[in-house]
Image: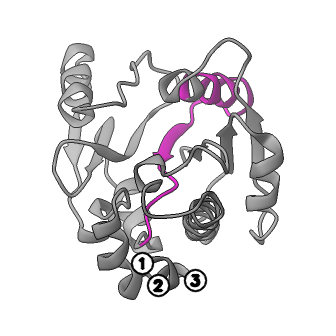
Amino acid sequence: MTPVVAVVPLRDGASGKSRLSAHLTPQERRALVVALARHVLGTLAAYPFDEILVVTADPEFTAEVVGEVLVPVSVLAEPPGRHGLNAALDAAREHVRATTWGARLLVAHADLPLLAVDDVDALVRETADVVIAPDRHGTGTNLLLLPADDDFTFRFGPGSRTAHEAEAARGGWRLAVVQRPSTAADLDTLDDLAELAGLAGLAGLADLAH
């Protein structure tokens, strides 16, 4: 069976959810980042991945987050001088290539409050080379599954769904798009927080939606 490694990029406890800075204190934003990340990691931990890897610019903060997860999670620090999400994912892929030959890589963002094991299974069971789960607007990429050994270029940023689809076409990789309400629901704005607080069931989340 082809090994599958889950990769979660995680920033730090200070700069995360910056779009909510006008509404939440730094302490509240930190608590939100922690709650969301622990939910995503806990969901991934319930699936039989060969490895769960968090790539981060702040290993100390990440150690605090993963300390509550009941299965081993590897933490990889972003290499010096290689900043940004795409560079961090390149570093994670290099690690996976060196440690788990022939693996598929599932990139999952750390702010998916409704993500469930069934969602993860739906992506992993897809037989296409590249699998995209778009955000609720249909323009971003919340989850991305791809072969770790291929030279697929990560294109996270504005319009990443179209960019990733174009990258798959460029390389001749078979593409599948998985659209599920719980993979599409990410949390970026105060409206998102108010809407998702009651659905997610994350401790303390509803208290922040004031």
Nearest the eye: 97 or 69: 69
- Residue placed under numbered mark 3 in the picture: 204
Mark toward the viewer: 1 or 3: 1
* Residue 16 image point, x, y percent: 55, 48
* Residue 15 image point, x, y percent: 58, 43
* Residue 163 image point, x, y percent: 23, 25
Image mark for residue 206: 2
On screen, residue 122 above or below 194: above
User: Which residue type does callout 3 highlight?
Assistant: Gly
In this image, 5 relative to 166: left or right? right
In the structure shown, which secondary structural element does the residue marked by tag 1 occupy? loop
Which image quadrant for residue 183?
Answer: bottom left
In this image, 119 relative to 158: left or right? right
- Residue placed under numbered mark 1 in the picture: 209
Image point (74%, 68%), residue name: 69
In this image, 166 relative to 201: left or right? left
Nearest the eye: 62 or 70: 62
